[in-house]
């Protein structure tokens, strides 16, 4: 509460997810001090691959992993059908956008923080 939060679901094995993470790093750098946070949930079976990716890509936000990726409770709760997937929450906890990536996410963040 109190911040815009991008909840993302991702996998190390998806090139689209890795590309998304790298773009999100730029957005995080630009908007974190203005009230933007990212909370990631990883769906990889291989915990070490996830840890290595977070370290290697120097992801500065909260990165967690499904407790049991073979039974992804959180992904089911959000009806995640493909990766990467995301949900943007406003400071009141309402979802204001979903599955926006790259330029579309950048435009949305510009709209929220630069008006």
Image: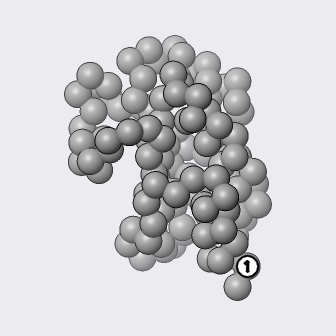
Q: Residue at x 60, y 61 (%)?
A: 105
Please state the horizontal and vertical placement of residue 84, each as a whole percent of the image: 48, 41
Q: Residue at x 27, y 33 (%)?
A: 72
Q: Is residue 73 visible?
A: yes
Report whether 63 appears left or right of 36. Answer: left
- Whether 51 is drawn above or below 40: the answer is above
Q: Is residue 64 visible?
A: no
State which quadrant residue 92 falls in. Answer: bottom left
Report whether 99 appears left or right of 102. Answer: left
Residue highlighted by disc 1:
114
- Whether 63 is drawn above or below 48: the answer is below
Total numbered circles: 1
Please state the horizontal and vertical placement of residue 61, each as a whole percent of the image: 61, 45
Tag 1, which secondary structure?
loop
Coloration mode: one colour
Q: Residue at x 45, y 33 (%)?
A: 42
Please state the horizontal and vertical placement of residue 113, each as a whole percent of the image: 68, 76
Extreme residue toward the bottom, this view? 115
Please state the horizontal and vertical placement of residue 115, each as a whole percent of the image: 70, 85
- Whether 19 is drawn above or below 24: the answer is above
State which quadrant residue 15 falls in. Answer: top right
Report whether 103 appears left or right of 17. Answer: right
Report whether 40 appears left or right of 77. Answer: right
């Amino acid at each position: 509460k109190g911040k815009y939060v991008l909840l993302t679901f991702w996998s190390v094995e998806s090139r689209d997810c890795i590309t998304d993470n790298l773009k999100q790093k730029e957005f995080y750098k630009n908007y974190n001090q203005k009230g933007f946070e990212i909370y990631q949930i990883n769906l990889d079976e291989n915990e070490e691959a996830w840890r290595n990716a977070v370290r290697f890509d120097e992801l500065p936000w909260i990165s967690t992993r499904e407790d049991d990726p073979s039974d992804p409770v959180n992904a089911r709760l959000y009806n995640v059908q493909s990766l990467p997937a995301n949900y943007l929450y406003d400071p009141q906890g309402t979802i204001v956008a979903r599955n926006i990536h790259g330029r579309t996410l950048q435009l949305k963040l510009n709209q929220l923080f630069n008006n």
